[in-house]
Amino acid sequence: MTTATTPHTAERARVADVPAIHRLIQHWADETGDVLPRTEGEIYESLRDFLVIRENGKLIAAGALHIEWKDLAEVKSLVVDPSAQSQGLGRVIVAACIDEAVALGLKTVFALTTSPGFFERMGFKQAAVAAFPRKIWNECFRCPKYDHCDEVAVSLDLRSRLD
């Protein structure tokens, strides 16, 4: 998937990408706290969820589409290398996640984010956090911001895109 703003393409992550994905996630978890920290083990376990963008052999962006239920998936761990910011790479990853969700026949994609405007520009709408299954809260208990969460739920209805 490419967009008009960037020539980059999202592709499936490979096992060899895990250290670089982990480095990017940890950078943003430590720098801003906007991404939930993940261990390399967690990334290996969910590697099939991840899409990445490479430039000159270097991984510069990553994100995951995690299926939560028969009709629902979450876009998570969306990270872009600090040296590659403002090139539309996050948008490419999210668009690829949406395309995959449609291909899988999912009805809704959501994200928990501190940057709702980014997702709203891609058609997401703010949503009530309570509308999502309790299953997603498994990760919230591990979050350093659990007692003072600043994330906003956003969702995208895909039903009009399904065959």
Image (cartoon, rainbow, N blue to C red):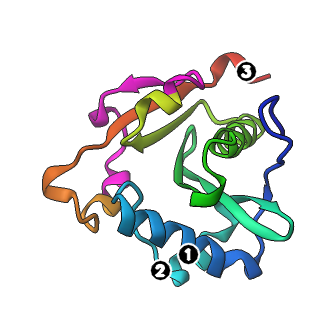
Question: Furthest residue to the front?
Answer: 83
Dividing the picture into quarters, in which one does residue 66 lie? bottom right
38 relative to 138 in the view: left or right: right
Q: Which residue lies at the image location 40% right of the left edge and 42% below the top edge?
A: 113
| Gap in angstroms between the C-alphas marked 2 and 3 | 35 Å
Residue linked to disc 3: 161
**Residue 74 got which mark?**
none
Are the residues at dot 2 and dot 3 in contact (C-beta closer than 8 Å)?
Answer: no
Residue linked to disc 1: 22
Q: Which residue lies at the image location 70% right of the left edge and 37% below the top edge?
A: 95
Q: Which residue lies at the image location 70% right of the left edge and 65% below the top edge?
A: 48
Q: Specify the amino acid type for callout 3.
A: Arg
Q: Specify the amino acid type for callout 2.
A: Thr
Q: Which residues are magenta?
A: 120-137
Are the residues at dot 1 and dot 2 in contact (C-beta closer than 8 Å)?
Answer: yes
SS at mark 3?
A: helix
In which quadrant of the rendered image does the C terminus lie? top right
Q: Residues within 10 Å of mark 3 (few under 14, many from 20)?
A: few
Q: Which residue lies at the image location 83% right of the left edge and 38% below the top edge?
A: 2
